[in-house]
Image: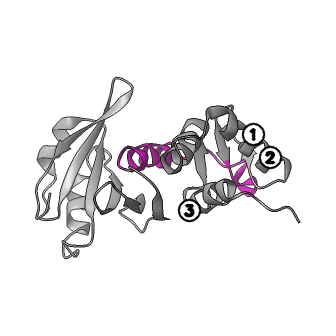
């Protein structure tokens, strides 16, 4: 039985929920915990994890759990992880996939407090259904990040929950403030 390092254990704890991660996301994840961690160290961690069959490479830059090798990579989850990492100053404390309509929920350490977020992927035409599914949700539970392919979709989303909109633009995500209490 091989023992993983604390960093490898942290990677695996996130990967158990997300199922897939890109190599650059693993580096950002580790580097947020310890700024001394380098890309080379991340590569060695991933190499060791592959050697002991804790992970496998799904593509040249995407890792997954070994039993998911033949599954199609989840681009929506990879996008939700990007958003999670954008909102994390230090460490991800808790992460979970779902439940619907949420793609990814997480609790993160931030410079002055904790942040509780949920990412919802909004496909064109699904705005009304997603809005309805949030009816009655606890407004104090978390801040919602709606990931939109088009910024104009934000006009079709109404909720009293604190929320932001994220749109991929020019190689990074742009965030727009929504409404709700505490946003």
Q: What secondary structure is found at the residue carrying circle 1?
A: helix
Report if residue 75 lies within the magenta region. Answer: yes
For residue 7, above or below residue 61 = below
Asked whether, in this view, residue 120 is left or right of residue 151, the answer is right
User: Do the CB atoms of the residues marked 3 and 2 lie less than 8 Å apart?
Assistant: no
Numbered marks: total: 3
Q: Position of residue 46 (x, y in %)?
A: 72, 44
**Hey, which residue is sitting farthest top in the picture?**
170
Label 2 secondary element: helix
User: How far apart in space, not on screen, are marks 3 and 2 (Cα)?
Assistant: 21 Å
| Residue assigned mark 2 | 48
Which label lies toward us, 1 or 3?
1
Report the span colored magenta: 64-87
149 or 40: nearer the viewer:
40
Image mark for residue 17: 3
Q: Residue at x 46, y 64 (%)?
A: 93
Mark 1 crowd level (few <14, some 14–19, many ≥20, 10 Å Cα): few
Residue drawn at the location 42% of the way across and 59% of the way down:
104
Residue 125 percent across, percent down from the top left = 25, 47
Q: What percent of the width, then of the height, locates residue 61?
A: 64, 34
* Mark 2–mark 1 CB contact (< 8 Å): yes
Q: Main secondary structure of the magenta part?
A: helix
Asked whether residue 86 is drawn in magenta, I would say yes
- C-alpha gap between disc 1 and disc 3: 22 Å
- Residue under numbered circle 1: 44
Observer-side mark, 3 or 2, equals 2
Crowd around label 2: few <14 · some 14–19 · many ≥20 (10 Å): some
Quadrant location of the N terminus in the rendered image: bottom right
Which residue sits at x=38%, y=59%? Answer: 109
Position in image of residue 139 (x %, y %): 18, 71
Q: Quadrant of residue 168?
A: top left
């Amino acid at each position: 039985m091989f023992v993983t390092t604390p960093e490898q254990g942290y990677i695996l704890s996130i990967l158990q929920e997300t199922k897939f991660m890109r190599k650059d996301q693993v580096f950002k994840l580790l580097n947020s915990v310890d700024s001394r961690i380098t890309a080379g160290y991340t590569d060695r961690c991933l190499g060791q994890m592959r050697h002991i069959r804790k992970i496998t490479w799904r593509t040249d830059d995407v890792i997954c759990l070994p039993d998911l090798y033949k599954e199609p990579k989840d681009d929506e989850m990879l996008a939700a992880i990007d958003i999670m990492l954008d909102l994390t100053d230090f460490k991800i404390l808790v992460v979970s996939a779902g439940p619907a309509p949420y793609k990814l929920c997480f609790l993160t350490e931030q410079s002055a407090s904790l942040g509780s977020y949920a990412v919802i992927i909004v496909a064109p035409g699904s705005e009304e259904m997603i809005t309805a599914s949030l009816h009655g949700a606890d407004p104090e539970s978390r801040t919602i990040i709606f990931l939109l392919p088009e910024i104009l979709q934000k006009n079709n989303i109404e909720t009293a929950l604190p929320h932001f909109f994220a749109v991929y633009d020019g190689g990074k995500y742009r965030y727009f403030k929504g409404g709700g209490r505490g946003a």
